[in-house]
Image: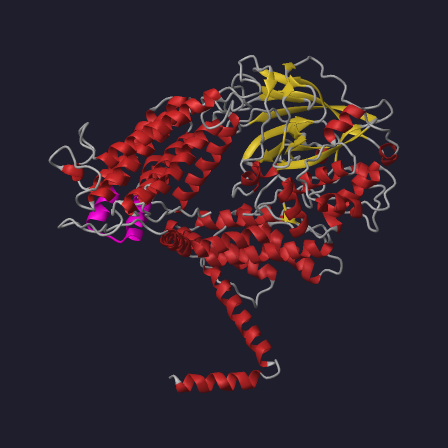
Amino acid sequence: MSGRARLALCAYAATLLAAGALIPLVDGVGWLVQAAVLLGVQSGVGALARRVPLARTLTIAVQTLVTLLLLTLVFVRDHALFGVLPGPEALMRLGELLVAGGEDVGTYAIPAPMTDGIKLMVVGGVVLIGLAVDALAVTFRSAAPAGLPLLALYSVAAGLSDGGASWLWFLLAASGYLLLLLAEGRDRLSQWGRVFGGAARNSGGLADGLAGVGGGSSPVRTGRRIGVLALGIALVAPLALPALDSGLLGGKGPGNGRGSGGGTISAVNPLVSLQNNLNQPDNREVMTYRSNIENPQSLYLRILALDEFNGSEWRSSTRRLTDVPDRLPQPTGLGRDVSVTEVRTNISASRSYQQTYLPLPYPASEVRVGGRWRYEPEGRTLVGDDGQTTRGAQYEVGSLVVEPTAAQLAAAGSPPEELVREYTQVPGSLPGVVAETAEQVTEGASNAYEQAVKLQDWFASDGGFTYDTTVTSGTGSSAIARFLRDREGFCIHFSFSMAAMARTLGIPARVAVGFTPGTMKADGAISVGLRDAHAWPELYFEGVGWTRFEPTPSRGSTPSWTRPEVPTDSASDVAQPSADTSADPSAAPSAEDSCPPQSRQEGGCGPSQEPGAALPTDRGTPAGTVLLVVLAAVLVLVLPLSPLLWRTRARNRRLGSGGRTPADAAARTLAAWREISDEAWDHGIAPDESLTPRKAAARIVRLGRLDTTAAEAVHRIAGSVEQVLYAPEPRPAAGLAEDALTVRAGLRASAGRGARLRATLLPRSSVRVVWAVAERRTALAERWAGRPGAGRWTARLRRLTRQHG
């Protein structure tokens, strides 16, 4: 067996051994057999490509392509072209499965059921790790850095198991890595000819491979002993250090277990999928409800509260759970003189919505629901016990509509010391700019209520913030500081930043996560979709209790108790609910071969003095080369998709929101019109700038063969454009983003498969990038020509060009 073939086999075995750490996380082991087959095909393709031989970059590209085809064939065969080619529908379905898998991971306890999403994450992750290991260890002949993806695979398994990973899985993963290192070491030594320090015991010498107990030379036997010793120390050392009670090797760490009784709820972070939900192309319905509330736009559905800020994230504290009482206790801090109305709400969750927490109007006073649920008193939330989720749940909720006045909030007394101590804690890592900004924004406020309103209005309208769901998510101290600097983000950034700033002012604060009220349907029910997912701050006022504020522009509704007395120069507009959409490389370490001092003294570092001895032909790949190869591979994959990526980015920015002022409303209207014009262009309907908006809309409807719903959406947007362009006092329109997406869906439905593929991968409107570059170039040229002395430099450049021409 050749050296590369031996390395490929060891890389395959090392990946499978490391993948064993994932077995305790999910039910069944069938996925491991499937992953082994896909890994085998991937490794075989790599072996054939190297035998041809192909260039290293081409070898990795071929393996990547085959891996994508395999995943398409196994997971999205029904959506693929000819059952195997990953077209746009197949790629979209893969993305949906990954999102669903992420939600399932956050929903189910270990061991989780093998849903389609989790299966794709597990099998696809193992196959991708195998590709990285094969590329580093076999294609680039650098086995040492191949341990990084193997370590990542084991670390993910150990982290998800909450420190409960067995030492057996670590032993298997480490053994696979040592096997890979030994194979590479034997292959390198075989290139030197006769090795100093001892001869081989069998006739085949080093080139015969790893077979045979006594087949190794002295250096190889020494390497085995060192590896076994290091592995033994790694397993035994934690037992001698009781302080290290959790980590990569597992063990029972401090905290509460996951017993079936559901005695406590451990800290969790439900924000993993919130940004993905806001950016979904389809606003999939997650629940519907009916309520006798007078103003449905104030009925937020709250999942849970995040009350602990440790500097790296906001999360919910570990709380004691109890049985769900027939009547929930009186909300903390609510006084008798505050106006309170009790309403009833009947909620029906879809079967596609699986969440451990039950969405409830806040504060709920009574919940009638079937299944196994537990009650957490501090956050007034219901938590599923023993695998219970919201999937298909139908339940009735009685809740209180608390309507304090501005005067009552302004006259609120001092909160209890224990509550202040818990809910005003900020980590030492919080940058000083957060507290400084809070002081500046609330300057002149005479009480906590006025400070809270000033903070809300600064974020929502006065501070120049932009709502953008494509901004990188983050909940820690650095993310808050970055948000205050860049002033771009979505509800997570607005709510976390306002809560942190309120805490620096001494106001008890936490963050609630849930859904905005949703959209009214024709039958009177209200539909809540994925893009209604939201986060908002809750501030505590004695006599009123935990009170909602809305700092996020264009999302939800501004609370009535913040509107009468706004301590700013201008009143903030009431935001109407809308469903907005937006539609590292790791440097692989490479150490150069170095000669140990003992070998240098024995003369083993220079050329061999023995006849026929040859210098090593492969010293591994430098880190710079590996980095260049990775960058080249990224360019090869990204460049063909650049029109698609640009078009997606443009759609997200146009259909996002940029504030509440009339100018912002006009800009949103024109952006929505530009979006549907470009979408029609992508589907073969070239724009005609000579037409009025009304005639252009009729042309899009006629040529695009739109159905009634899409046609009405086009005409609504065109009417809004005419309002903006011609009306003396334009009326801002709501639902523009929804209408634009409805038009897009109508154009795609009436187009053939080829037209949809062309519109997705090679959109005609992407030529706007070329036009923008040309305009920028012309502007720069004109600016340069206008500078003093520009003509002299231009003439000199022309002379130099003629001399070297």
In the image shown, does 279 or 800 lie closer to the viewer? 800
Residue furthest front in the image: 601
Q: Residue at x 54, y 28 (%)?
A: 350
Reply above or below: 581 against 778.
above
* Count of labels in the image: 0
Question: Is residue 708 visible to us here?
Answer: yes
Relative side of 460 to 386, left or right: right
Relative side of 670 to 451, left or right: left
Question: Which of the image's four quarters has the N terminus?
Answer: top left
Question: Which of the image's four quarters has the C terminus?
Answer: bottom left
Residue furthest left in the image: 203
Question: Is residue 370 visible to us here?
Answer: no
Q: Locate residue 723: give its quadrant.
A: bottom right
Q: Main secondary structure of the magenta part?
A: helix
Relative side of 488 to 103, left or right: right
Reply above or below: 155 against 256.
below
Q: Residue at x 21, y 42 (%)?
A: 196
Q: Residue at x 29, y 34 (%)?
A: 223
Q: Position of residue 376 (x, y in %)?
A: 66, 19
In the image shown, does 126 or 549 lie closer to the viewer? 126
Q: Position of residue 348 (x, y in %)?
A: 59, 25
Q: Is residue 62 magenta?
A: yes
Q: Is residue 753 magenta?
A: no
Q: Position of residue 309 (x, y in %)?
A: 66, 33
Reply above or below: 55 against 792.
above
Q: Locate residue 394: give its quadrant.
A: top right
Relative side of 256 to 52, left or right: right
Q: Position of residue 443 (x, y in %)?
A: 83, 46
Instruction: State the extent of the magenta-drawn residues as a range.
Output: 45-66
Q: How is the image coloured?
A: secondary structure
